[in-house]
Image: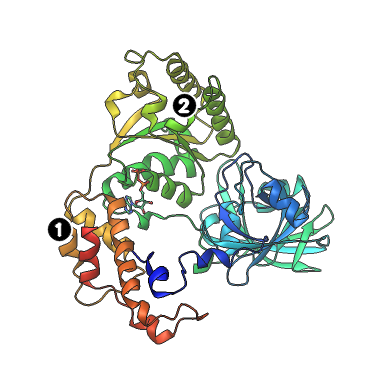
Amino acid sequence: DGGGMDAEGGRKDFSTAILERKKAPNRLLVDDGEGDVVPDYSTVALSPAAMEELGVYEGDLVMLRGKRRRETVCYALPDESCPEGRVRVSRGVRGNLRVKLGDVVTVNRRVAAPNGTRVQVTPFEDSVAGISGDLFEAYLKPYFSNYLRPLCRGDCFMVRGNMLAVEFKVVATEPADCVLVAPDTAIFCADEPVKREDEERLDGPGYDDVGGVRKQLAQIRELVELPLRHPKLFQTLGVKPPKGILLYGPPGTGKTLLGRAIASESGAHFVVVNGPEIMSKMAGESEANLRRVFEDAERLAPSIIFMDEIDAIAPNRDKTHGEVERRVVSQLLTLMDGLRPRTQVVVIGATNRPNSLDPALRRFGRFDRELDIGVPDDIGRLEILRIHSKDMPLADDVDLERIGKDTHGFVGADLAALCSEAAFQLIREKMDVIDVEDETIDVDVLNSLRVCNDHLKHAMEV
Ligand code: ADP
């Protein structure tokens, strides 16, 4: 507890210093793209308050600056649900800005971008592997036909077609680095796809961020990713991919993480529905909300709808007396039954209590697959520890295997917390050599930092 420091030692309290640097009104924290407004590659959602402060009106172009001097231009959209001090941008734009959720972006009003005379784009090799045909007609023309999309050199953007999504990189733009693609803009699409550079990888968790669930991951990829990416395969064979999958297991075992990883790895839109949250809405609204979630998912397909604590939404109707619950269960059934096999939407339900679900939900054609995401064993815990310590310099005395064995009963979330607590413990110890007033930290100090066995031991006891 460092809180008492300043009172006794007269030292300044720096616990909130990190927040202060961000007070400039145009430095905003990056939030998820999910809210009342769902931004895409060409839009950014801002709270009405932030828009007013920045002097930005709906539909104005704003310039966003992220990390590594990355800049992009988007249209501003007001979003009542956007918390103060935040911007909502899509995952793709986050990738372009090289930022993750919670990072800071600078938002500047931008008066205009010139209409492009010429833009050149090229598809990513991995997104067009195995396909041929006219990308311009199939993807680019429709993508640019709706409105004047801003495009900046170096940006990537993903275009979803019926069958699959193709990701392009903007190689050149004329007459400026950021232009609007107008009807008379000449769009050139290179025939030679480009290889993806490491930094262009989309953010969001990947499969290698999920540990201890190898078998389940393989199953879920087969059930979800394959149909989302290659619907044709299933159509040709005349089999229907599952509409719903139930993941059950205690909290913190990585069910949500798994869903997110599948979505980001397969380029699907991901929306989380929190069971208790949706039920706490006023009477009638729960059903409407649920309908909206399904509508959006179909519109933005391929999509994964993740229903966390689905038992709150769909409890066994025989055992509940609540009128609202009954209605919501039937609404959910109707929506699931209404999903056409061709709409690439998969619903993943997560629960700790599979038996408290309404049995109708677990019938064929609904949540007809179930995967047990249990508490990890020794090996699973070791895998998870490796994941969460992969960016940490570990001292030679650290034996992750030992720690994996000693943490019986820990779930993924506990192990993640363990790793960050160990790092914090190290930082606390090093406060004497870190000058908090300095803008930078000496590289020698940084290089000397090692998380030791003691830090991890300490963290296990917290
Ligand atoms: P659940 O949805 O089962 O309650 P979450 O996916 O929300 O669990 O887990 C919370 C966090 O704990 C994750 O974001 C991740 O940091 C960590 N975590 C949980 N399970 C795992 C796992 N199997 N592998 C790696 N990290 C995990």
Which color scheme did the rendering employ for the protein? rainbow
The amino acid type of the residue labelled 2 equals Met
Mark 1, Cα crowd under 10 Å, few <14 / some 14-19 / many 20+, is some
Mark 1 and mark 2 in contact? Answer it, CB < 8 Å. no
Q: Quadrant of the C terminus?
A: bottom left
Q: Which residue is mark 1?
A: 406
Q: Quadrant of the N terminus?
A: bottom left
What residue do we see at 82% from left, 60% from top? Answer: 111
- Which badge, 1 or 2, comes first in the chain's sequence? 2
The amino acid type of the residue labelled 1 equals Asp
Q: For mark 2, give the secondary structure.
A: helix
What residue do we see at 35% from left, 72% from top? Answer: 427
Residue 312 placement: quadrant: top left
Rendered position, 274 above or below 416:
above
Residue 460 placement: quadrant: bottom left
Rendered position, 312 above or below 387:
above
The percent coordinates of residue 333 (x first, y second) are 45, 20
Q: Nearer the viewer, residue 176 or 89?
A: 89
What residue do we see at 35% from left, 21% from top? Answer: 363
Q: Nearer the viewer, residue 310 or 154?
A: 310
Image-based side of 372 in relation to 9, left or right: left
Q: Judge whether residue 143 can be spotted in this image.
A: no
Q: Which residue is mark 2?
A: 279
For the residues marked 1 and 2, what is the alpha-carbon distance in whole angstroms?
39 Å
The percent coordinates of residue 268 (x first, y second) are 51, 45
Q: Is mark 1 within 8 Å of ligand 1?
A: no
Q: For mark 1, give the secondary structure.
A: helix
The percent coordinates of residue 162 (x first, y second) are 59, 40
